[in-house]
Amino acid sequence: MTINGNFSRVFFVAMSLAFGLMFSSAASAQSLKFHFHFDGIMSCMSPVPVSNAPISGDGNGTLNEDGSVQAVITQGLLIFKTALNFDSKLGPGLTQVPGGTGQMRVTGRSGLKFVWNLPNNSIIVNVNVRGQSCSATFQSPLMPGKTNYTFFDGSMYHTCGKPTMTSSSCEIQ
């Protein structure tokens, strides 16, 4: 299932400004293309109980000099995949998307943070750039008072335990 709309305008919104500042010194740099990937495992209780199910995420995007970002981030649990399309400028606001809200933020002078807020937790991908290389990290903090994690597959929520990341990578293209 694909989640379209304004999610990209919020989720990973601030990263464009940070990348813009970082790469503005390079006269020939019109845009920055990046790709990240992560893998992990997660056990879910409902709607179908499953132990140590594979989870993954891939993101491809372009950060433009004017602060706009185009990115597609696909996150998966078992056979369920959800694509989040971002096409926006960086900014502080939240955007309504199926399953929750999205936001993109700049973190420091060289990072972007993509946030997908679900009912019980957020799914956060941090991308940090250093020269012509980058790194990506994944977090999924619980909302206050919540004890289980949620994952939205495009049509329904899955109630799960804490995801564990096993690998991540990032590259500047």
Image: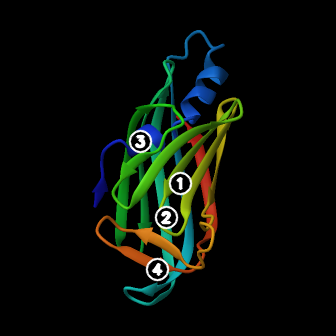
Q: Residues within 10 Å of mark 2 (few under 14, many from 20)?
A: some
Identify the residue at the far bottom of this view.
49
- The image quarter in which residue 107 lies: top right
Q: Which mark is residue 8?
A: 3
Q: Which mark is residue 37?
A: 1
Q: Amino acid at mark 3?
A: Ser
Q: Is residue 71 visible?
A: no
> Which numbered disc, 4 or 1, marks the residue closer to the eye?
4
Report if the CB atoms under discs 4 and 3 are less than 8 Å apart. no
Q: Which residue is mark 4?
A: 159
Pick whichever of labels 4 and 3 is earlier in the sequence.
3
Pick whichever of labels 2 and 3 is earlier in the sequence.
3
Please tell me whether residue 147 is drawn above or below residue 111 in the rendered image: below
Q: Position of residue 2 (x, y in %)?
A: 29, 55
Q: Residues within 10 Å of mark 3 (few under 14, many from 20)?
A: many
Q: In the image, is 5 to the left or to the right of 151?
A: left
Report if the CB atoms under discs 2 and 1 are less than 8 Å apart. yes
